[in-house]
Amino acid sequence: MGNLVFRKVLDLSNIPPSWSLVRLAADWSGFPILLFVEGKPARPDDRAISADPWTFTRWYQTPPKAHHAIHFDGSAIKTICFERSQGISTFHVQPLGDGWLLADRRGGCANLHDASGHFLRSIDLGDASEDIQTTSDEKIWVSYFDEGVFGSGIGQQGAVCFGAAGIPEFKYGEFAERAGLPFIADCYAMNVAAPGDVWLNYYTDFPLVHLQDFALEHVSKDFGVMGNGFAVRDEAVIYARETKLVMRSLVLNAQDESGQSLVPLTAPHLGIGYRGPNLLLNTGLAVYVSV
């Protein structure tokens, strides 16, 4: 079993007792953004819900007093309180331009705030958003779960890229049909690694789709489910399986040093050779050694 080493960047011991964590997200640099709700009762546990199924509904429908985010500004840790934020399904928080986007999971309402948390305006990003990730060039990527995909709004596309004004610029459903890719019934996981660099994993076929600038870079069909999120690192994906982390290698394309694709012979023991970290590749015209 391998190890992945982490360093502590934030101590949660001093969080006010009236705050409850709603979401752990990441900013463009991969640093944490924590969204808290203030003034909401403690979430009922499974025993309470089993005794009274309406317990969860009553808790969910109780509006909070406010939402707060803890985030990094360079090396400084800052806290922001969002003005006019009392939504019962508020779940997404991301930087957008010089300010912030705070969005509800149901109903599609996304509120834009300035750097101090003051409300600016609202845009509609569609109902049933599974995840929202923004980029430094002010794009808003939204993935949707099944109630949005099988609803009547923009969520039917499965994943959409919006501009900062809330106008769709890329619709995955239309793109997938043209590219012959599987249909999204429920987008389980999305990773917007950089502007234009987007990875998707979704039900029902669970491919791993890599988009680059709204075009298909690569697809690994039947890659398998990775839960509700994953990282992309060193030609592999890392995701959680209960309390453990799992690393899986991506499918790689072989190429020479000029960028030309290489296709090895398929006969056993003729096309590929291995020793330690090194690979030998025989195209039938030449033999190559991994760099």
Image: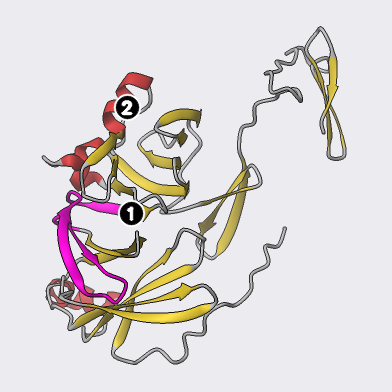
Residue 209: x %, y % from top left: 46, 35
Residue 44 in sight: no
Q: Say whether disc 2 or disc 1 marks the residue closer to the N-terminus.
A: 1
Residue annotated with mark 1: 131
Residue 31 in sight: yes
**Left or right of 222 in this view: 115:** left
Foreground of the two, 241 or 78: 78
What is the CA distance from the residue labelled 2 to the residue labelled 1? 19 Å
Query: Quarter-wise, where is residue 248 in the image?
Result: top right
Residue found 33% across the figure and 54% down from its top: 131
Query: Over which residues does the magenta segment extend?
Result: 106-130
Residue found 52% across the figure and 80% down from its top: 10
Residue 216: x %, y % from top left: 45, 28
**Disc 2 crowd, CA 10 A, few/some/many (<14, 14-19, 20+):** some
Q: According to the image, what is the colour scheme of the structure?
A: secondary structure
Q: Is residue 112 magenta?
A: yes
Q: Which mark is residue 175?
A: 2
Three-letter amino acid code of the residue under disc 2: Phe
